[in-house]
Amino acid sequence: MLTLVRQNAIRDILHKEKSVSITALSGRFATSTASIRRDLEKLERQGLVKRTYGGAVLVEGIREEIPLIVREVEQKEAKRKIARAAAAYISDQDTIFMDSSTTTKELTGFLADKKNLTVITNGIRAMTELSLLDTVDVYGISGKLRKPSLSMVGNQAETNVTNYWGAKLFFSCTGMWISHGAMDYSDAEAEVRKKMMSVSQQVILLCDHTKFDRPAFYKICPFSQVNILITDQKLNPQWETLLQQNGVEIVYAE
């Protein structure tokens, strides 16, 4: 089968099934997994699919959200590196905000040695992980359950956030767009993050390299509202200059 014909066939499968695995496609088209990976890489460059661990999902627009179960495994090692670096900014007795992102959830794995830490979060997965740590007090943000992200959002959540005050906010985003700043799939998620920013002394953005030059549906904040960006790969000069001009400290996780 010609490569172009196979790629068109993969697109048709994705439109029907929304997600595919490399192994299944390899068997279906009787070709190597390396060839399927190259097909998916090309389709991703065209903005038609989003590659994931072992496969790909259909991209139907800037508001199309990748399933949580997929987001939790994609770029997992990069997220862990970023989270490890972020933990160094947390001191004993701090009160911190954490959003519901999968990147921030990785931060929970590096908090066991923190003493008398207070964490305020709207992420149910983060609450569950933090409940295992005896030295961490956890405050959950109440509100409407947003099932795709297992988070609490809405007017009640936004109001609830403003009753607290934190030393630091750790948050992530769907995409980083030069003209719009940090962006997200969900306006509801973004509005909760904005409230967290308004009651935090320091704003720390955790963002792996795949999110740069990637727009999303809704603006979270301009770069000027971010104090520190922690990422996993060296940024190009255009991004470095832009962030530095906006007063953002760039930290590369090792």
Image (tube, rainbow, N blue to C red):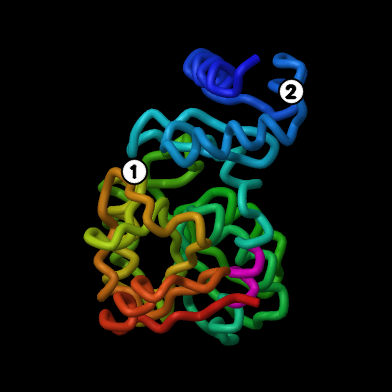
Which image quarter is the N terminus in? Answer: top right
Q: Confirm whether the magenta stretch covers residue 54.
A: no
Assess whether residue 83 is covered by the magenta stretch. Answer: yes
**Quadrant hosting residue 226:** bottom left
What residue is drawn where x is 52% and y is 73%? 234
Which is more toward the observer, 112 or 202?
A: 202
The vertical placement of 98 against 252, above or below, is above
- Mark sitting earlier along the chain (2/1): 2
Residue 61: quarter of image: top left
Q: Position of residue 199 (x, y in %)?
A: 30, 73
Which residue shows up at 52% across the image and 62% down it?
208
Q: Which residues are magenta?
A: 80-85
Q: Amino acid at mark 1?
A: Ser
Q: State the CA–CA distance, disc 2 to disc 1.
A: 34 Å
Residue drawn 64% across and 73% down? 84
User: Mark number for residue 26?
Assistant: 2
- What residue type is disc 2 on? Ser
Instruction: From this view, report whether residue 225 is shown above or below residue 1.
Output: below
Q: What type of secondary structure mainly makes up the magenta span? A: helix
Q: Position of residue 92 (x, y in %)?
A: 59, 86
- Residue pointed to by mark 1: 186
**Residue 17 in view (yes/no):** no
Give the camera-side residue of 22 and 165.
Answer: 22
Is residue 237 something that shows in the picture? yes
**Figure quadrant of residue 254:** bottom right
